[in-house]
Amino acid sequence: MNEPLVQIAMTVDGAPLSARVRPRYLLSDFLRERAGAPGVHVACGHGVCGACTIVVDGVAVRACLMLAVQADGATVQTIASLPVLEGTVTEGTGLTPLQQAFRDHHALQCGYCTPGLLVSSAKFLAAHRAPTRAQILDHLNGHLCRCSGYANIIAAIESVLQ
Amino acid sequence: MMASRNFGQRTRRREDGPLLTGRGVYLADLIRPDMAAMRVIRSTEAHARITGIDFSAVANEPDCIGVLSAADLPQGIGLLPAADLVEGSAPAHHSVLARGVVRYVGEPVAVVLATDPYVAEDLAERMAIHYDTLPVVMDVDAGCRAAAPLLYPQFGSNIVHQTRQLVGDPDRAFVDAAITIDETFRFQRVSANSMETRGAIAALEPGSGRYLLHSSTQIPQILRKELARITGIGLESLRVIAPQVGGGFGAKEAIYPEEVLVLLALRRFGRATYWIEDRQEAFIASTHGREESIQLRAAVGADGVITAVEADCLSDIGAAYSFLSNTPGAAVASVRGPYRIPNFRSRARSVVTNKTPLNVYRGAGYPQATLAMERIMDLAAAAVGLDRAEIRRRNLLPPEVFPVDRGVSYPGCGAVIFDSGNFPALLESTLDAVGYDGFPLRRAQAAAEIPLGMGLSFVVEMTGGGGGEPARIRLLPDGRLQLLSGIVPIGQGSETTLAQILADHLGVALETIEVLTGDTDDSPDAPGTFASRGATMGGNAACRAGDVFIRQARQLTAELHRARLEDIIWKEGVLIDRTRPDEPLTLGNLLRQAAASGIEPLRALDAKGRYDDDAVSWSSACHAAVVAVDRATGIIRVVDYAVTHDCGRVANPLLVDGQIIGGAVQGLGQCLFEVNRYDEAGRPLSTGYMDYVLPTAATVPRFILRHIETPSPLNPLGMKGAGEAGCSGALAAIANAIADAVGSQVNVPNGSGPFTPDCVHSILRGAHQEETPA
Amino acid sequence: MKPAAFRYTRPGSVVEAVDLLVTNGSAARLLAGGQSLMPMMVRRLERPSLIIDINRIAGLDAIEVLPTDIRMGALVRQEQALWSTVVRREVPGLAAALAWVANPVIRQRGTVVGNLATNGPAAELPAVALALGAKFIVRHADGEDILPAPALLGARERTLAHAMITHVLWPRRPAAAGFYEVARRDGHVPVVSSLVTLDGGDCRVALSGVCRNGLSCPSMARAIARRFPGLPAIAELADALRDDLTGPVYSDTYSSARYRLEVAPVVSQRAARLMTSRIGPV
């Protein structure tokens, strides 16, 4: 089929980018393939697992449920922007508080679900300074991890809250 | 083994840096824009004759790079192997593209290559495959009947494999038994569901002209050997690399059609080709796990001592013998677990059905066998009026009898000989951890509408094996050491663990060791990552290579200093000439001195070692689960979960705990949520995560983890594997807890459920049928 | 799992959007949050030839206080509505239900109107709209209609042709509200869910997952109002439910009709208990 291309422009992790894309090109694929953001991971492709979570114009969203054309004019942030999203890194390691906590608590194993989980958690903690355990679990309901069994992820997030 | 500075420490992982920052390099990250995207056209029928494959709508499309079907495969090319066939197995040759007959929904029939995956999917839709349907076999009982339709008429039966075990005189024991218990347990079909799906990329290596395959696989070395033969490419012309793998759990431990097909497509169309499995595809294209039934009879004395057990296992291995499809059922040879039970008979049969092929999945049959035995334990306790912990005490093998030859063996494991263990200590520790003695009071205080139950389980599990393990150590120009290991990182932290082990063995700082994995050029003979063998086998191999390296370093030093080899000692990464003790030589200085003398130090210091003892060691664990059952809604929560785990000497307890928790939650997922169902026509009903429910953080219990170490006498490090016992005990502990919660008056179906709300609700009302009515 | 090809357009106004719907008919689909439509499209179960992306239409993301209603535009996100002080005060039943819908990231993109328009089986919000007497403002080529919720969500629902829902109107009714849900797993798709609100003697009960479409349950509501501040027994609620059914009981592969029918009174009773204890959402 002849698919007319659409001109789009956006910033991704602080870098401006423009491209001509097919309308059906998924934002997840665009970020991975054209925007130099392979840290956006596709695990389920239908919005349930959360591995592809990114931030578009300040809101955490599933990249696999958006079209690249929908991000035209937007500010997009992926895992690479985590220091900006959290606002701080540790001198020396260059890791953000969440990244440091995940490492300390062994909250990742294969690492595939981790970038989306970190982005989503950074936004969640920015919006909820003192969440209840129920709210933390509601947030984590949006993320599937098959390796870790979650206990260490919960511990890592709770440690950042202290 | 020298100073123990790192071994046993909760060392944080070196792997984490790139993974936390999104810089891990997984298979899909290696795709280049010039590559062709391959899409597999899969059978939509469970059992049918292919009467026509019509490419005409797509073959001449400008976007279509090529199409392949079975007719395009040269004779003898593209036949998949089965590794665990033994005497008495039916022959198994499965073509990577269906020849004439399809036997499961999802079976590859053709492939199409296009410039990108969107277009490939468009083209695939427009190919027409015509079928004449055949009668389907959708369960093992139907498959075993005399008049059953045969998936492979040339076999004469749907029962394609059988193993038997016999120890002692079980018939006698049954005659003498005070009580006989006879139960049949059913285990549903599940999928491993690693978060990274499968994928493969075939390209030509610039310069060498070799075929280079990247695959998200646990077994790159075995894969290379098999692919070299299956494709006809030959070993010398093929290199296989496993990049960072996003979880495997056994489903990436097979030789898959797509791995063959990308290579054949490259060969045929001259273009680097990739295939990425999508999630919907994964449910039908990646191997399934667990589906079997186990009938277990136990001869029980009035004192609760079980004198005999007889097991009959029927595994539903799906439509084809995949690489290790026999192992899950064969594990029933170990059904007696930690219990003495001197008389034993078992039969394990594999039955083909029109479903996705079955392969190993975390625990490889042990979760099922453990549930059957542990459920019988609870039933026996009730039958003779004994406490559930006490009946286990009376049956456990005591520590003084090790090593214990169980009198059975099975393919992939060999003889079952428990090397070491302390089962009574595991039991007492877990009872304490979960609050067993205080539980009656806790149960009495729980609301009547949300009763609590507690379940115990014991698992003894084979780890290691797979054949000898190589390792290689090279000196880097900056004086650091590089370990090349055949263990593939699939999330278990092998690089960190191996570095810890080797650092201690050599007496050097942890940071001086770099670990490389996954490339068959570096580690061509290694078996790969499965059966929880990584740390044990890889660690011992690293130490062997370390010994070779030390000797090489001493020899080089002796040569340079014209000293006697016996006068050169290695001490914590430094070489000391006894005759000149004030002039210790670092590796960096050794490098410089060698170079100045015209010796190539990097060639002289390249140590290959091998740990050749492939003996299997036996990890063990005692689990206890506490569940709460909401009687009104049928919803079950696992509240507490205690595990005391023995994997011999533990290199990194932080990582071992992570394996136990991850495994236990997979078991929880199977008990409460997960199932791959088929309809009567053989169409799969799980197509995504709206159908197939995985556990999330909200479902996770409070964990109480403890360790006991009974070192394995079988390897110098005294280690055993830790990857699977968390999963293998969980089905049993949770199933026992559920039965305990609902009470003995309620008929709970035997097996791992899943115990969905509807299922539990109908169980409580005595209205349960085998399948949840739709 | 890549969508089939389509043309894409991003109208700047409702008039343009409706024009496109009229011209293209059922081959076009409106795209708002995409949390329901995109999963269908990547599986190629939906294959529109034109996607009309309404996300940039100004003014549709407002939550406005009118004399008797709260007017919520088609681009109001679920998370936005959940945390809106206006919604929590004036339409507490909606806020109570939203806390149970999916998870925060889905809610941040998914819209209230989109969820209602999709009207998935067992979805929480359509029943809530029926029970609370919501209305839809629908724009078509010749003007605007106000449709009561049953017209689009009830047992005899009709599909909107050549028209677009621009707003949903929620009657202002500060009330005590309680919501409860059972699912195969916490946070997974709902099996049965129920809202109970009480404002003086006016009790509303919404029930999802028992019939294919959501139910407003006046008989169950009367039973609850009658017993307040106590709670009716399960059997009493089950009896009342029989009067409120509008069609056959729903079932799917994992949760049977029998289960749904038996667990529904339990769910409503728990929602009523939550309402009675005045525990708000989250």
Image (spheres, coloured by chain):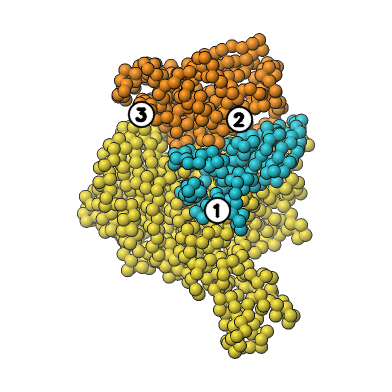
Chain colours: A cyan, B yellow, C orange
Give the answer, above or below, for where A50 lies relative to B297.
above
Give the answer, above or below, for where C282 lies relative to C91.
below
Q: Residue tagged by mark 2? A: C34
Q: Residue tagged by mark 1? A: A100
Looking at the image, tell me whether mark 3 or mark 2 is earlier in sequence order: 2
Q: Amino acid at mark 3?
A: Ser
In this view, which residue lies farthest toward the top?
A: C142
Are marks 3 and 1 in one subunit?
Answer: no
Q: Amino acid at mark 1?
A: Gln
Which of the two residues, B754 or C63, is positioned nearer the viewer here? Answer: C63
Q: Chain of mark 1?
A: A
Label 2 with label 1: CB-CB less than 8 Å: no
Residue B307 relative to residue B294: left or right: left
Q: Residue tagged by mark 3? A: C277
Are marks 3 and 2 in one subunit?
Answer: yes
> Distance from label 3 to label 1 (Cα)?
41 Å
Residue at 34 percent across and 41 percent down: it is: B628
